[in-house]
């Protein structure tokens, strides 16, 4: 009877245990509630490695963080700030990192320094006023970005580099246009140039600015002359940037920003040269200084040339020459005769070392044997 009672008691205990587990399962919070509770705990104290590891161990996977709109804009580089064009970040910075920097062309900065000095003198003679020209900076831009950044109204002069067979762009801003017109037409000093916006430029204004552009282009040609002779020819004058397109929008270009001050008047002048225009003189612009040649000394070259002209050389008059085998030469003895195929009228070859120089005929002058030079031997270049 005891074993039967134990079996019945065990069955009853198992039924009671199962009922208790079911009740506990009913009272257990849902999975969503557990996840919400863990997120709340992480929100109160996030950033500790222990919490992250505990979350990974309990839930079986790492929680994925969702970026907000500001973080997405920062990642893509679209912050939209006032100086976002200069300080780009994210993907935009990666896309623009392929731009070629003007610093890889050191001689170009020397050329623009020469241009600044020459323009200061030329514009003083042109305007009969005290003109100061300064170079603000040199920047590398895409051509399309530069056209979109031009403040209107402005005049855009398209010019062509004749020897390089390509074009450049010269931009004159509104302040400089009215300042030049005011100076050339006799405006008094001490009064700021009047700016009348909202109307097209008149023929007189265009002609006066075009005269100034011719002066600038002449100075630009003179600035490049020690490096490579080139003539910049004025092509046309535009007021709409769309009509001044000289290159593809994605092509790289160098922009030199010049500041022209005439006491209390002045403005900005921007010179754009696409890299395709500078390609014919790229090797020259890569030099660190003008006329760079490794190990060359002009003073020593001149001295060496003068000494070479005074050097004495020995000339040989060759009547005839024969080619003999080596055993015939070794078998020669005193009294052996060599028969030359030469007559008194045969041509004599004058040689300096092994190099033939002249051909002539042999004769006699007084007690000396003389040779009359008839022709100069042309040497073949390898």
Image (tube, grey):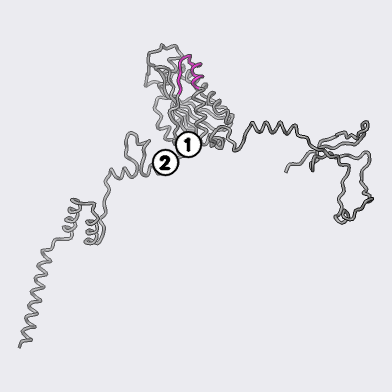
Task: Give residue 337's position: percent from left, percent from top.
Answer: 94, 49
Task: Give residue 59's position: percent from left, percent from top.
Answer: 22, 61
154 is higher (above) or lower (below) than 315: above
Identify which residue is drawn at 58% across, 33% down: 291
Kindly indicate whether the residue at mark 2 contacts the one at mark 1 (C-beta within 8 angstroms): no
Task: Give residue 146's position: percent from left, percent from top.
Answer: 43, 33
Identify which residue is drawn at 85% across, 37% down: 359
In the displayed structure image, the side of residue 176 where residue 361 appears, left or right: right
| Magenta span dominant secondary structure | helix
Give 280 or 173, whichever is nearer the viewer. Answer: 280
| Mark number, residue 302 | none
State the residue position of label 2: 96
State the residue position of label 1: 103
Q: Considering the image in quadrants, where does the C terminus appear? A: top right
Q: State the residue lying farthest toward the bottom.
A: 1
Identify which residue is drawn at 44% across, 16% down: 181
Q: State the residue lying farthest toward the front.
A: 334
Distance between the alpha carbons at the discs numbered 1 and 2: 16 Å
Question: Nearer the viewer's eye, disc 1 or disc 2?
Answer: 1
Q: Considering the image in quadrants, where does the N terminus appear? A: bottom left
Give 147 or 264, whichever is nearer the viewer. Answer: 264
Task: Give residue 166's position: percent from left, percent from top.
Answer: 54, 33
Q: Of helix, strand and loop, which one carries label 2?
A: helix
Q: Which residues are magenta?
A: 119-133
Q: Of helix, strand and loop, which one carries label 1?
A: helix
Give 71 or 363, whichever is nearer the viewer. Answer: 363
Q: Is residue 131 magenta?
A: yes
In the displayed structure image, the side of residue 31 where residue 337 appears, left or right: right
Q: Is residue 238 magenta?
A: no
Quadrant in the picture for residue 300:
top right
Identify which residue is drawn at 36% across, 41% down: 89
């Amino acid at each position: 009877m005891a074993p039967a009672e134990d079996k019945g008691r065990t069955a009853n205990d198992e039924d009671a245990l199962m009922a208790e587990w079911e009740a506990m399962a009913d009272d257990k919070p849902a999975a969503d509630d557990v996840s919400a509770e863990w997120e709340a705990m992480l929100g109160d104290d996030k950033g500790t490695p222990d919490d992250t590891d505990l979350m990974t161990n309990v839930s079986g996977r790492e929680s994925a963080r969702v970026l907000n709109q500001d973080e997405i804009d920062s990642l893509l580089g679209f912050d939209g700030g006032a100086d976002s064009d200069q300080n780009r970040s994210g993907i935009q910075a990666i896309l623009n990192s392929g731009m070629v920097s003007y610093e890889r062309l050191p001689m170009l900065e020397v050329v623009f320094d020469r241009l600044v000095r020459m323009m200061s003198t030329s514009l003083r003679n042109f305007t009969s006023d005290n003109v100061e020209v300064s170079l603000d900076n040199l920047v590398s831009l895409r051509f399309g970005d530069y056209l979109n950044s031009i403040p209107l109204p402005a005049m855009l002069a398209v010019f062509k580099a004749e020897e390089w067979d390509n074009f450049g762009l010269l931009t004159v801003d509104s302040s400089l246009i009215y300042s030049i017109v005011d100076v050339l037409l006799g405006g008094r000093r001490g009064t700021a140039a009047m700016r009348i916006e909202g109307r097209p430029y008149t023929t007189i204004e265009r002609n006066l600015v075009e005269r100034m552009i011719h002066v600038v282009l002449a100075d630009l040609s003179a600035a490049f002359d020690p490096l490579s002779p080139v003539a910049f020819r004025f092509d046309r004058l535009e007021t709409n940037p769309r009509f001044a397109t000289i290159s593809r929008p994605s092509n790289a270009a160098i922009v030199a920003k010049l500041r022209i001050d005439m006491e209390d008047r002045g403005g900005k002048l921007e010179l754009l040269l696409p890299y395709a225009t500078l390609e014919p003189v790229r090797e020259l612009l890569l030099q660190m200084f003008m006329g760079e040649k490794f190990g060359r000394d002009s003073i020593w070259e001149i001295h060496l040339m003068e000494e070479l002209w005074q050097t004495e050389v020995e000339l040989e008059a060759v009547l005839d020459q024969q080619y003999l085998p080596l055993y015939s030469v070794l078998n020669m003895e005193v009294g052996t005769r060599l028969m030359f195929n030469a007559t008194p009228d045969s041509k004599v070859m004058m040689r300096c070392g092994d190099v033939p120089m002249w051909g002539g005929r042999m004769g006699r002058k007084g007690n000396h044997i003389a040779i009359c030079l008839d022709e100069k031997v042309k040497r073949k270049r390898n």
